Image (spheres, grey):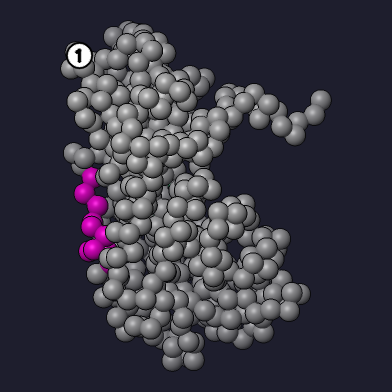
Amino acid sequence: MGFRYENNELYVENIKVEEIVNKEKTPLYIYSKSYFKKQFEKFDKAFSRKHCVSFAIKANSNLSVINTFAKLGSGADIVSKGELFRAIKAGVDTSKIVFSGVAKTKDEIEYALKNNIMMINVESMDELYSINEVAKNLGVKARISFRVNPNVDPKTHPYISTGLKKNKFGIPYDEAYDSYIKAKNLKNIDVYGVQFHIGSQLLDSKPIYDASVKIAELMKKLEEEGIEWRAVDVGGGLGIVYDNRKDTPPSVEIYAEQIEKAFEDFPDVLLVFEPGRFMVGNGGILVTEVVYHKTNSNKNFIIVDAGMNDLLRPSLYGAYHEIKPLKIEDKKKIVCDIVGPICETGDFLARDYEIENVENGGYLSVFSAGAYGFTMSSNYNSRVRPAEIMVDNDTYKVIREREELDNLIKGEKI
Ligand code: LLP
């Protein structure tokens, strides 16, 4: 299930995408509920031992999306008070929530402790002392894990690499042992586990295996110091196919096998996962209307109504997203830049892209837009954010209304 062409027209599950677009207009995010469910089940079934899948809601934090996963038993990986608020509103079991992020404030820590989440993934000693203090004031013991930076190259885009020495994330591997010993001696800290996350869009399973082995070694040493591990959180990062000519991510089964192997000496420790992109990336599209065509000194432009404010990935990372017309008519192909309405040269969805020419008023689908699409959108150039639609078989729901002009000035005063 998900997205497919039938008689040269794009369908999402059992609805023609154009039918939705005619009613709901563009730009428009459309998600496939059955795709989301299938991905969760695939991930969940790949592991043979005790585990917890905590969907990284930064990838797609619409309440209905989070709720779809929560109903299947998913927890949530959160990185802010706002994400915890969303997870709770969406019905996530708080005992399956893990909290990462380098700058958790005391207010955020308090909110997390009051909601009794599984654990806080601590990213510095300063943060650990803050957690201890907040826990003391609340009269509780805070369950924590350190986010350990294993210094392994994930071989992905530098902006989404997180597990290298030079990155701001986690505590250095070489300091982790001492940090745990210090944490163990704090009265209001319960050392619960260890976490690592080396990067996103991983297309090779070796770095994650290498990092897992390093973490397991650290766990063994600390076990000798009396630490009783209850959870090991492997983070997220499993890559997906954006470009089917190039991207070959490991299968989730291989990913699972390698991780289980690395942690085989800890069979009773709960394995926690924080997948984001894998769950939702290929379960969403962004539909945009062709507004104009133009040619400047031999370069063709297709100008569309979705821009970097709606989908930032091409501009920020030079990311590739496949783009196709909703209706394939076997017209002549052109090579062009597909650009948005934003007043920035960096506002493009694709560059030097070969595509069947679509007339003004026609529609294009930007694929693989379910992860880090809407969540990274903004109101730049005072453009309203698009609506989000969830399709379930042959029906659909607007799960977030298109913004109106009043949304743009909410809270502002003259
Ligand atoms: N856990 C932690 C601690 C993370 O920082 C992330 C992603 C995840 C889990 C989920 O990773 P995933 O399974 O989705 O790869 N905006 C970028 C991606 C940034 C990822 C940030 N952290 C993009 O559009 O590619």
- Tell me, yes or no, whether the highlighted magenta stretch contains residue 255: yes
Question: Residue 49, percent across and down?
Answer: 32, 76
- Tell me, yes or no, whether the highlighted magenta stretch contains residue 39: no
Quarter placement of the C terminus: top right
Residue type at mark 1 is: Lys
Q: Nearer the viewer, residue 223 or 120?
A: 120
Q: Answer with left or right where residue 200 lies relative to residue 45.
A: right
Q: Answer with left or right where residue 314 lies relative to residue 387.
A: left
Secondary element under disc 1, as helix, strand or loop, is loop
The structure residue drawn at horizontal position 49% and vertical position 53%, both measured from the top left corner, is 67
The structure residue drawn at horizontal position 37% and vertical position 35%, both measured from the top left corner, is 285
Mark 1 lies on residue: 331
Residue 166 can be seen, yes or no: no
Q: Residue furthest right?
A: 414
Q: Answer with left or right where residue 34 lies relative to residue 129.
A: left
For ligand 1, tell me if the residue under mark 1 lies within 8 Å. Answer: no
Quarter placement of the N terminus: top left
Range of residues picked out in magenta? 247-256
Answer above or below: position of 40 versus 187. Answer: above
Question: Residue 254, percent across and down?
Answer: 22, 64
Question: Residue 46, percent across and down?
Answer: 27, 65
The structure residue drawn at horizontal position 62% and vertical position 52%, both measured from the top left corner, is 82
Label 1: few (<14), some (14–19) or many (≥20) C-alpha neighbours in 10 Å: few
Q: Nearer the viewer, residue 261 or 317?
A: 261
